[in-house]
């Protein structure tokens, strides 16, 4: 279970909004709003969302932003369907994404004409005129200001974790998954085996892996096995066959192929390079 100390978190987000004049909203890991300063949304966006079809496009833009931020596990900047700039920053706690901070509804000079063009296609004529009026009132934001805002949001996200404003009441499944994989590299780590061990469906395991590990579980397992293989090749005198078995590959030839695909060289060449490097250092 995840706990949020919302009173203190809300105060922090309010301060960000007051100081920067940029709308910053806190979301949980399922993309539900936890706190929005004075339930604020710029007048321009409020007008856009009076049209049901445009409102759906707004939500689709936001979800694409969340998806990119989740897969990259770092802030993601994008333009919404009307051309305004938004930034989504994942909040990471114990290597698990537990929420997001979105800073947005910013207008950049280079996107101004594109925004006007999209307004021209807005279905309601009266709303179209109001949107143009609001556009005239909006402050133009530079890349430097957006970078500074992104840095500030990242610092605040780190502050939430450092001050334990977000905490786990029990070990989250994502941490258990990572710990199990890293402790059982030589065992059967097939999707079917992991689903049985963690009592979840393939789709649930996939979503958990994408959120917590930043990639599919199969790719994460391969990365960890190759990382361990490199360590064993460098630090031990085990045969390549023994190393293959210790990282979950019964077929040495297949291990050699996977290793070369991952590193660009064979295990033998990797070991020789490591030995030469140690000799040179001496």
Image (cartoon, grey):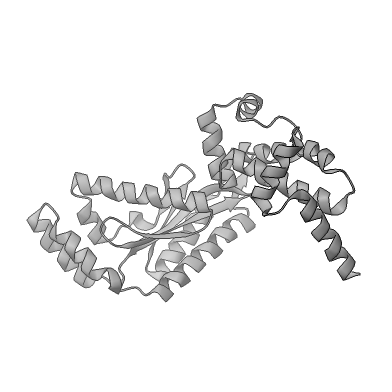
Position in image of residue 104 (x %, y %): 37, 61
Vertical placement of 206 versus 22: above or below? above
**Where's residue 8, x and y in %?**
53, 56
Residue at (16% x, 68% y) in the render: 133
* Residue 105 higher or lower than 212, as above or below: below
In the displayed structure, does residue 121 sit left or right of residue 35?
left
Give the quarter of the figure containing the N terminus.
top right
212 in relation to 75, above or below: above
Determine the residue positioned at 50% across, 49% down.
71
Can the viewer see residue 224 in this picture?
A: no
Please state the total of marks drawn on the protein image: 0
Question: Where 53 falls versus 22 (above or below)?
Answer: above
Residue 250 image position (x, y, % from top left): 76, 32
**Quadrant where the C terminus is found in the figure:** bottom right
198 left or right of 61 in image: right
Instruction: Name the one closer to the observer, 50 or 226.
Output: 226
- Decide which of 46, 188 is in the foreground and name it: 188
Residue 159's quadrant in the figure? Answer: bottom right
- Residue 280 image-quadrant placement: bottom right
Taking depth in this image into account, of 22 and 269 the one nearest to the observer is 269
Asked whether, in this view, residue 217 is left or right of residue 121, the answer is right
Residue 250 showing in the rendered view = yes
Left or right for 41, reference 177: left
- State which quadrant residue 279 falls in: bottom right
């Amino acid at each position: 279970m995840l706990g949020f100390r919302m009173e203190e978190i809300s105060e922090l987000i309010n301060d960000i909004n007051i100081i920067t004049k940029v709308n910053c909203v806190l979301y949980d890991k399922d993309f539900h709003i936890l706190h929005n300063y004075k339930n604020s949304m710029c007048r321009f966006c409020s007008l856009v969302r009076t049209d049901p079809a445009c409102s759906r496009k707004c939500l689709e833009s936001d979800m694409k932003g969340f998806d990119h931020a989740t897969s990259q596990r770092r802030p993601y900047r994008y333009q919404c369907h009307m051309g305004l700039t938004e930034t989504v920053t994942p909040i990471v706690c114990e290597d698990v994404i537990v929420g997001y901070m979105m800073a947005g509804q910013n207008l950049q000079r280079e996107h101004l004409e594109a925004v006007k063009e999209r307004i021209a296609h807005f279905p309601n004529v009266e709303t179209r005129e109001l949107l143009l009026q609001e556009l005239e009132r909006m402050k133009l934001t530079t890349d430097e200001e957006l970078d500074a805002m992104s840095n500030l949001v990242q610092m605040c996200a780190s502050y939430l974790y450092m001050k334990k404003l977000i905490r786990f009441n029990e070990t989250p499944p994502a941490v258990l998954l990572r710990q199990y994989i890293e402790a059982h590299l030589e065992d059967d780590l097939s999707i079917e085996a992991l689903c049985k061990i963690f009592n979840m469906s393939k789709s649930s395991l996939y979503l958990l892996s994408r959120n917590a590990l930043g990639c599919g579980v199969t790719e994460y397992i391969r990365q960890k096995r190759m990382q361990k293989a490199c360590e064993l090749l460098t630090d031990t005198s085990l045969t390549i066959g023994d190393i293959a078995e210790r990282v979950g590959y019964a077929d040495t030839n297949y291990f050699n192929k996977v290793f070369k695909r991952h590193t660009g060289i064979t295990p033998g060449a990797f070991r020789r390079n490591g030995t030469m490097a140690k000799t040179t250092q001496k």
